[in-house]
Amino acid sequence: MLAWFNIVQTERMEMNDTVQERATAGLRGAHWGSARAPGAAQLTTHPLPTQDGAVVSGFWFRAGGEETVVVLAHPREHLVSHYLVPEILEGGAAVWCQAPRLVGNDIRLEHESALFDLAAGLCFLRQQGYRNIVVLGNSGGAPLWALYNQQAKLAPDARVTHTPAGRPVNLRDADMPVPDGVILVSPHKGQGALLLDCIDPSVLDDEQPLALDPALDPFSPANGFNAPPASSAYAPAFVERYRAAQLARVQRIDRRARQIVRDRAAARAALKAGDTTAAAAAAYTPVLTVWRTDADLRCFDLGLDPSDRNYGSLWGRNPYTSNLGSIGFGRLCTAESWLSTWSALSTNASMERCAPAITQPTLMIQYTGDNSVFPADADRIFDWIGTPDKQRVKFAGDHHGRAVRGGSAEPQLDAGRAIRTWLRQRFPAA
């Protein structure tokens, strides 16, 4: 039984045998008890240099002798305590959790830089001699891995050369191992596409988020809103106007972000030419505060794209709290991170754009009570995946695999079993 871990700190990519801690804290210890599980697993931490000069950490779970490793990553989340880690280990595969360089931070997140983080982990694992490297993208990790896979499979000269804000990025010279398989869990269309669906278009001026257009207010009873637990009922004409206005708001923020980028570039050019008065403007990096980003009509009108979901969004039932609170999608970001990550119009990290390049065996796990990935979204994502060797399984859970009404009491365990079965079928050494 996987009763405990050896937690080993590894420095400079050299193994240090000092056991610092034995723990299962944060790893959902109840899931470790299994007659099928191997002996005690070891966790070692590995700080890795990236090819663009950063340092990122990888967390390597293994019992020894595995020929397949599953790699979990997300653009800003630290996944070392992810519920699928023990589930995968029970199937005989090792697990690598790749930490991002900016944990929990959207302010400077550019997906193009995040690709170097993934490459560092995959290069390390390739050096360890694994026969199969399977990548797992949960939620926003799915479009990140899709972008990585797309770029890794391109000829070096065909890869992205600049971020959407115009910053040079040298993927051409990067060593980017191509994964052997792909697992997608609760995959959404991309952070930009996600925000496009849930941004509140009633905002008239992003500098004045309390001033609204009442004709577009999603939380006005006049427009069909009902407070929980009653479902709202938005008219088709309102939904159509609302979606068009969401696009218009993203376009406005894009224009603002691009103007910030242009102003800074002009100041830097002036400074380089000898104008010392431009020093302040060249360094000035405004942080955009994007309010009201939790207003997808489908979260409140359960008749739109029906599913097993409950009323409300990922952030809860109270739209005022999630729309105007300090925490929310894309709340704080630079112009560069907005364009690279949160703009549906500018980002490279789009499942629609990148999933066709997934030609490896692919497993997609969909939770039917998800209130951020709706049935129509999941259908599109599965259709976009390029490989004919793709499998889709559904469980009655929410976005994080927690039980919803009428389903299994343990959707996370169901997902783990599905992954183990798929790994045995596609990568028998696991």
Image (cartoon, rainbow, N blue to C red):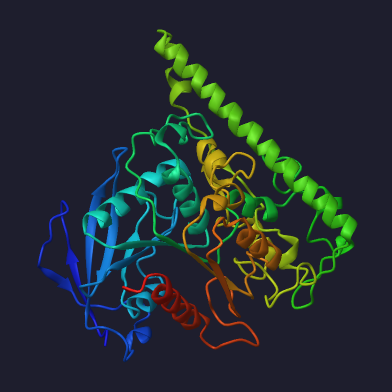
Q: Residue 135, position in %: x, y?
A: 41, 61
Q: Is residue 379 shown above or below 197?
A: below
Task: Answer with left or right where residue 352 lies relative to residue 278.
Answer: right
Q: Is residue 410 shown above or below 311?
A: below
Residue 349 in view of the camera:
yes
Q: Residue 383, position in %: x, y?
A: 64, 60
Residue drawn at point x = 50 percent, y = 21 percent: 265
Residue drawn at point x = 39 percent, y = 54 percent: 103
View extreme (bottom): residue = 35
Q: Residue 53, position in %: x, y?
A: 28, 38
The quarter of the rendered structure image containing the N terminus is bottom left
How many numbered dots are placed on residues in this image?
0
The answer to which quarter of the image holds residue 16 is bottom left
The quarter of the rendered structure image containing the C terminus is bottom left
User: Along the line of sight, which residue is nearer the eye, 65 or 347?
Assistant: 65
View extreme (top): residue = 274
Residue 108 in view of the camera:
no
Task: Answer with left or right where residue 9 lies relative to residue 329.
Answer: left
User: Along the line of sight, which residue is nearer the eye, 16 or 63?
Assistant: 63
Q: Residue 419, position in %: x, y?
A: 45, 75
The answer to which quarter of the image holds residue 168 is top left
